[in-house]
Structure formats: C-alpha cells, structure tokens
Amino acid sequence: MKTTTTKKKVLFFIPTFPVLTETFIEKEVLKLVERGNIDIEVLSMDGDRDKLNENLKDIVYYKRLNFLNIIPVPIFIFKNFKKFLYVFKKLKNKNTSVITLLYKIIKSCGYALIIKKHEPDLILAHFLSEPSTIGLISSIMLNIPFVISAHARDVTVSAEYVREKIEHSKFILVCNKNARDKIISLNYNVENEKVILQYHGVEVKKLQEVKAKEREDKNIPLIVSIGRLVEKKGHEYLIEASSILKKRGINHLIYIIGPGPLYDNLNKKIESLDISSSVEILGEGKGLPFSDAISILKSADLCVFSGIKTEEGDEDGIPNVIVEAAAMNIPIVASDAGSVSELVTNEDTGILVRSRDAYMLADAIERQIFNRKEAEIMSSNAYKKVSMILDMDKNIIELENKLL
C-alpha cells in the first residue's frame, strides 16, 4: 500500500547509472534529491553501486529482467488485454516485424511490473530510444503518466516511435536545439509544443572553485580535450592539427582524456605522425575520474572540441567539456558539429571552425595561443553565457517545476 506523502513520486528509468561520460544525469538527479521537493527513485538495468554518490545509494535500484520476471507477464497482459491490443496496434508499423514488436511489448510489460512496485506518480525515461519505448508501454499498461529526457545519439541515430511518444507523453525534454529540431522533423511537426528545450548545465560556482592541477612547465601551452574515444569526438583531427602545429615550430602539449574503443588506433596515429612528445591520451583508454579530469582542464590554456557528425548521423549536442571550460574561464576552440554553436559563437565566446578540417583547427589553436588578450575576452563572454543559460543551479529549478 502506498505510504501517505505530500511529495510527488518520480521514477527515473535510466538504462545504465551512473555512467562516466554522462555525469550530467547523475548530477541532475542528485540536485533534485538535495532540493527535497520531489520523492525521487532511480530504476536502472545496469551500473556500479560503489560509484554512486553516497546521497543516491538508497534511492537507486538495479534490476535486469530474468525468467522469473517474465513468468507473471502473460497474466498481466490477460488482465489488461485491451491496453495490450491498443499498444500493439499503435506501435505496429512496416519497419518492425510482429515478432520484434511482441518481444518489445513483453519486455516492457516485465519492466512495467517492476515499475508498478515502486508506485510512482510519474515515470521519467531517459533517451528517445528503447528505454523510453519501455517507458511508453509501461505508462499505457499502468495508466501512469510519463515524460522523456532526450539527448543526442538517441535522437539522431536510434530514436523510435517518436510520434507515439510525443502523443502519449506529457512532454519531451531535449537538452539542445539541434536534437529538438531533429525530433520535430521526425514528428512531421505534430504537437511541437510538447517538445521542450531544457538545458542540463553545469555547477558554475563549484567549477569556479576547482583547484588546477600543477603543471611541470607553464611555458608550454597546454591544450585539453575531454571526450569518449569514439568517432564522433573527432580526436583524429585534433591529432592532425598537432602535427601541423609542430611543423610550424609551435611548441605545445595536448592532453586527450576519455575512455573508448579507439584508444589504440589514436595512439598509432600519434606515433605515425611522430608527435608523441606533443600529444598524450591520459587514462590508457579507461578515462579518468571526473575530479582528476576537471582539475587538468582547469590548468589548461585552451580547451578544444573537435567533434564531427558521423555518416550514420551521430553527433554531440552541447558537449559538457566546453560548458565546463566556459564555466572556468578557459578559452575554447570548437568544431561546428551538433549544437556547439549554441554556446560557441565565433570570435565572441570562442573560435568556431569547420568540422573535419585539421588546418582550420590548427589555425584557431595558434590564434588562441598567441593572442591571449583576445582569448581572455572570449572566455569571459563564454562564462557570462554559461552563467545565463547553462547554470545547473538555475536550470534544475525549471526542471523541478515541470515535474511537479
């Protein structure tokens, strides 16, 4: 029986929690918990409890479906057969086979039974891909309202049942304009008012207080790039830019920080270009703890984001690293992929270059290195912009009000 409470109970459904490359999700949940106005619980399929913030350990539940969870599903479907038929007819389309759809519905009903035990007033499903499909079906089967938090790849590459999700959700929150525009185009401009731009942001005050890591030689310009070692981050172009700078006789040091499958390939590229003294990938392909990475970024002379749009359409929204850099007054050079231009306006809040262009990237890095006064003006402007639209302490209040 549900306990008496004046607080609204929101269940966050997140496939893996926490994730090193998605720290903004954990911080957002933590902020809501700390504010104490909503009863928050997190249901996740996978994750490491030992890596959770201490204030979250009691509200995070890990559950991956097994055979025992599936046993009661047929009875659940039988008791809610009209809803089951509605879901089946609503989601049936030429792109999904009947067997695949039935599998999705059965799986979702299994999670619906788990969600039911939490007795939420609202389900918040992260990602416009399969997790929110589970949220959609659970919402209909349980008659519990749901909302979606959409991000980047889940919108541009793996989104599914977009129209149905917009129709049945209370709203869809999207953290960047590029992804919001994509959702609207996928939805054929139906009910666009339910697709809401809601930035995540960073903790600006805390980032201002970060202590910079000591550097061995402050006379060598330090450039830092943080991001997963995957294609869309475009690290190969930053490595090529380093080679160009070296040929120009420009002394510099680049730290690339992030986990990912391209660690070996990127190291081979560094070796082949003979720039091992100028470029180093920290973390041996496993990345670094956030506290270490952010301390290194704070010590940098320049933050570079060299992301691209892949052939399958994967690209970033507003990368956290450039938001964090702006919050710490670190000058920025960034490529124009994804929604980067929402923060980096060329020659105002940083230098924006064409993606996949190592020469433009090298030129921009050289300019920021040798024009320190200009770089400081741009970094100051970027800080002001972040403080206005990407401060988590402000944005979390907007999110909370939407969920209440």
Image (cartoon, rainbow, N blue to C red):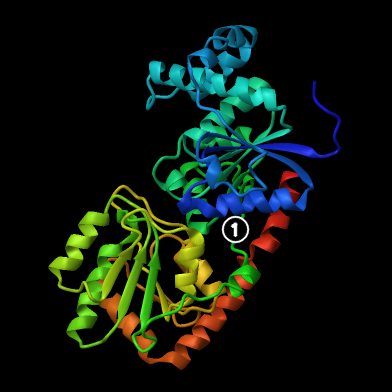
Work out whether residue 309 can be spotted: no
Q: Is residue 320 positioned above or below 128 on the image?
A: below
Residue 43 appears at what percent x and percent y? Answer: 60, 34
How many marks the image carries: the answer is 1
Mark 1 — residue?
199
* Residue in the image at 51% along x and 63% along y: 291
Q: In screen coordinates, is 283 left or right of 340?
A: left
Residue 397 appears at what percent x and percent y? Answer: 73, 56
Work out whether residue 153 can be spotted: yes
Q: In screen coordinates, is 371 left or right of 60?
A: left
Q: Nearer the viewer, residue 62 or 323?
A: 62
Quadrant of the drawing holding the N terminus? top right
* Quarter residue 60 falls in: top right
Q: Nearer the viewer, residue 92 or 367?
A: 367
What is the secondary structure assignment of the residue under circle 1?
Answer: loop
Q: Is residue 105 positioned above or below 358 on the image?
A: above
Quadrant of the drawing holding the C terminus? top right
* Residue in the image at 62% along x and 32% along y: 168
The furthest residue to the left: 272
* Quarter residue 306 falls in: bottom left
Residue 39 appears at what percent x and percent y? Answer: 75, 40
Residue 312 appears at what percent x and percent y? Answer: 31, 47
Q: Is residue 144 positioned above or below 9 on the image?
A: above
Q: Nearer the viewer, residue 153 or 220?
A: 220
Q: Is residue 127 positioned above or below 272 on the image?
A: above
What type is the residue that disc 1 sits on? Tyr
- Crowdedness of circle 1 by 10 Å Cα count: few (<14), some, many (20+)? many
